[in-house]
Amino acid sequence: MPHANPDLHEILYCSNLATGLSPAVVGTIVAHARVRNAQRGVTGLLVFDGYRFCHHFEGPRDTTVRLMDRISDDPRHTDVRVVYEGPLEQRRYPRFEMGLADADLNFPDLEGLDGNEALARFLQLRPGYDVS
């Protein structure tokens, strides 16, 4: 059985857009994140339905943990909940510094799901997203 790369880590979290913010702010978030993520070796996919975020990202362990701390403190997010975190064998998003998918239907409803179950549900829905 393959073993996870001890330096590679993944985090999946869900949050809400802060009250009073326009969904247009997500374009700014993604533009800045793509530059920073490319510099730090972070790749991933952000799914946004106009109100809710579901973000799955990967990279060096220390970098991903620090990024999650920053996201948790970002006032543009509320109700931040990490639903999965753990080591990773190989990247799931080798070409995306930050892929963005708008979701109208099939937004990953991860309420009540945690750990491997939440990750499996997100990955099951991923092929259906139109990623930009």
Image (cartoon, rainbow, N blue to C red):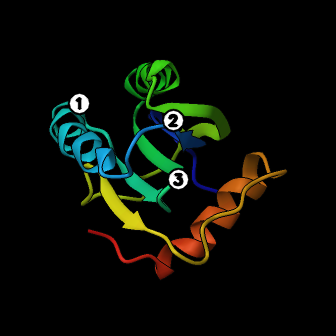
Screen quadrant of the C terminus: bottom left
Q: Which residue is mark 2?
A: 18
* Residue 19, percent from left and from top: 53, 37
Q: Say left or right for 18 vs 92.
A: right
> Which class describes the residues within 10 Å of circle 2: few (<14), some (14-19), or many (20+)?
some
Q: Which residue is mark 3?
A: 51
Gap in Å between the C-alphas at discs 3 and 1?
27 Å
Residue 92, quarter of picture: bottom left
Looking at this view, name the residue that lies furthest to the bottom: 128
Q: Which mark is residue 113?
A: none
Residue occupying image coordinates x 25% and y 38%: 33
Q: Which residue is mark 1?
A: 40
Tag 2: amino acid = Ala
Residue 87, quarter of picture: top right
Gap in Å between the C-alphas at discs 3 and 2?
8 Å
Q: Say left or right for 121 vs 35.
A: right
Residue occupying image coordinates x 58% and y 32%: 78
Residue occupying image coordinates x 40% and y 56%: 45
Q: Say left or right for 24 vs 111.
A: left
103 and 17: which is toward the camera: 17
Tag 1: amino acid = Arg
Confirm whether residue 91 shows in the render: no
Residue occupying image coordinates x 27% and y 57%: 96
